[in-house]
Image (cartoon, rainbow, N blue to C red):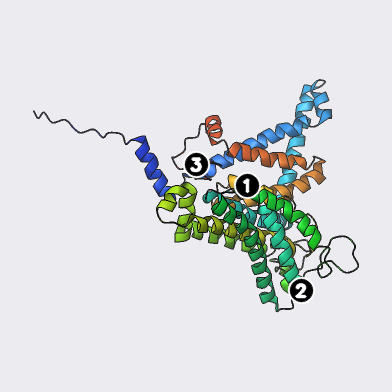
């Protein structure tokens, strides 16, 4: 008999495994396990709906009183209330051509702004200034839209280009400050948000911007040649508002995916985001990367702002025209795990919640604030994947998808 013993494989050191996973993620080779990418977020959505149902039930004082008097009737009415609320939410977002149109209208700026924040995350930056970048991009795009006399297609393109440039400048300055002086982009972008709001109010009072005969800050109406085309205009229905802004958002998502995972510049973005000192040692221009990332992120947010002026049928700027989209984009980028495809899916989900929430409020008298609670619950559960895996006993692969070093890891 031979004394040779079969060699047993020694387990690979955990440090070497982490290094290999890091390098594969840096090169864009890691494939996120489908359970991590799809199943866990879906279970997070389900969990949020369950908790939301409990909130809907306990928010009705009459139902709470009925529980102490007639258990069976209270249970029946509670189920009916929850069912009617979620049925209205679904019908208002996906049941029919008009609800789908409203969902996509709401999703378009969310996707563009979410891509802006997600791109910053990938480079290790927290672009909390999407709100201000949207404001600047929107008002500049609107001014180009009503002040120039150009042919139809050219006018739209020029307005979008100027909106992107305005957003890029507003985003690039904090990036340059971060690279040159070390000023944290969270602080500078917050300050730029605060500057953008009164700046918009002032611009809207300028004679060449303010609508004639109005004392309140409202801009002139964008020319028809600068308006984003309605995608369902051939149906001759005024209630179908979905426009080419959604196509623009999908094109932007494709561009960001190509930029991050197929281009040398995107590799540098992710390398600097993973370790700026190592990237600098490797010969990468960290100053250029930080400035470039924030400029491109600002351009995406600027397009989101122009989407609200050139695509929405009012076709004008007024204070608060971007609502809270720039801040919602932060949650949306986290939900989409800073991946362009995930941002698109999260944007459509948030758009559906917004569109369906209005129908839910009208049909059941449930406050629209419940939708905000649902969005927050979804983010909470998605941000705690270990909790979801523990509750539903889901086993996932190694890939988790980097969000941003130091902020969402």
Q: Earlier in the sequence, mark 1 or mark 2?
A: 2
Q: Position of residue 94 (x, y in %)?
A: 69, 51
- Between 3 and 168, the one lying in front of the other is 168
Q: Is residue 83 above or below residue 168?
A: above
Q: Which mark is residue 147?
A: 2
Task: Count the numbered circles shown.
Answer: 3
Mark 3, other Cα within 10 Å: few <14 / some 14–19 / many ≥20: some
Nearer the observer, 200 or 237: 200
Instruction: Give the spatial CA distance, label 2 vs label 3.
Output: 51 Å
What residue is at 39 percent from the left and 40 percent from the top? 18
Q: Residues within 10 Å of mark 1 (few under 14, many from 20)?
A: some
Residue 186 in percent (x, y) is at 62, 47
Residue 104 visible to an observer of this rendering: no
Q: Can you tell which of label 1 and label 2 is closer to the viewer? A: 1
- Tell me the residue at 58%/60% (across/down): 296
Q: CA distance from mark 1 to mark 2?
A: 34 Å
Q: Earlier in the sequence, mark 2 or mark 3?
A: 3
Quadrant housing the N terminus: top left
Badge 1 element: helix
Percent coordinates x, y for residue 223 in the rendering = 77, 72
Residue 216 is situated, as x and y percent measured from the top left of the image, at 88, 60
- Label 2 secondary element: helix
53 lies left or right of 249 = right
Tell me where residue 135 sits by quadrant. bottom right
Q: Farthest left residue?
A: 1
Marks 3 and 1 sit apart, C-alpha to C-alpha, by 33 Å
Is 283 situated left or right of 158 in this image?
left
Label 1 close to label 2 by CB (< 8 Å): no
Q: Which residue is mark 3?
A: 35
Residue located 60% across and 36% down the image: 381
Q: Residue beneath label 1, please?
A: 186
């Amino acid at each position: 008999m031979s004394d040779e013993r079969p060699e047993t494989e020694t387990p690979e050191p955990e440090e070497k495994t982490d290094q290999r996973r890091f390098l594969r993620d840096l090169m864009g080779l890691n494939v996120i396990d489908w359970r991590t990418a799809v199943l866990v977020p879906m279970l997070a959505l389900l969990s949020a709906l369950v908790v939301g149902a409990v909130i809907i039930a306990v928010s009705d004082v009459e139902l709470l009183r009925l529980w102490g008097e007639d258990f069976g009737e209270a249970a029946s009415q509670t189920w009916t209330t929850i069912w009617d609320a979620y049925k209205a939410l679904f019908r208002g977002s996906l049941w029919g051509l008009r609800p789908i149109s409203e969902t996509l209208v709401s999703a378009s700026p969310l996707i563009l702004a979410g891509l802006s924040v997600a791109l910053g995350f990938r480079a290790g930056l927290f672009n909390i200034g999407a709100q201000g970048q949207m404001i600047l991009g929107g008002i500049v795009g609107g001014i180009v839209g009503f002040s120039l006399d150009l042919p139809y297609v050219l006018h739209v393109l020029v307005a979008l280009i100027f909106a992107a440039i305005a957003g890029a400048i507003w985003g690039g300055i904090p990036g340059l400050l971060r690279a040159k002086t070390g000023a944290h982009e969270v602080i500078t972008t917050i300050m730029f948000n605060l500057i953008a709001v009164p700046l918009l109010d002032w611009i809207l009072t300028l004679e060449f911007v303010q609508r004639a005969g109005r004392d309140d800050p409202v801009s002139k109406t964008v020319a028809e040649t600068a308006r984003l085309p309605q995608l369902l205009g051939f149906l001759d229905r005024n209630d179908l508002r979905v426009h080419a802004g959604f196509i623009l958002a999908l094109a932007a998502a494709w561009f960001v995916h190509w930029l991050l995972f197929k281009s040398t510049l995107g590799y540098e973005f992710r390398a600097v985001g993973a370790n700026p000192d190592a990237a600098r040692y490797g010969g990468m221009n960290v100053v250029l990367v930080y400035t470039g990332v924030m400029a491109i992120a600002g351009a995406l947010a600027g397009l989101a702002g122009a989407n609200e002026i050139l695509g929405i049928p009012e076709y004008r700027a007024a204070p608060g025209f971007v609502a809270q989209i720039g801040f919602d984009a932060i949650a949306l980028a986290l939900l989409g795990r800073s991946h362009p495809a995930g941002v698109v899916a999260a944007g459509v989900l948030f758009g559906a919640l917004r569109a369906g929430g209005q129908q839910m409020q009208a049909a059941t008298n449930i406050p629209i604030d419940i939708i905000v609670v649902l969005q927050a619950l979804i983010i909470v559960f998605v941000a705690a994947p270990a909790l979801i895996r523990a509750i539903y006993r889901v086993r996932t692969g190694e890939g988790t998808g980097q969000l941003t070093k130091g902020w969402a890891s």
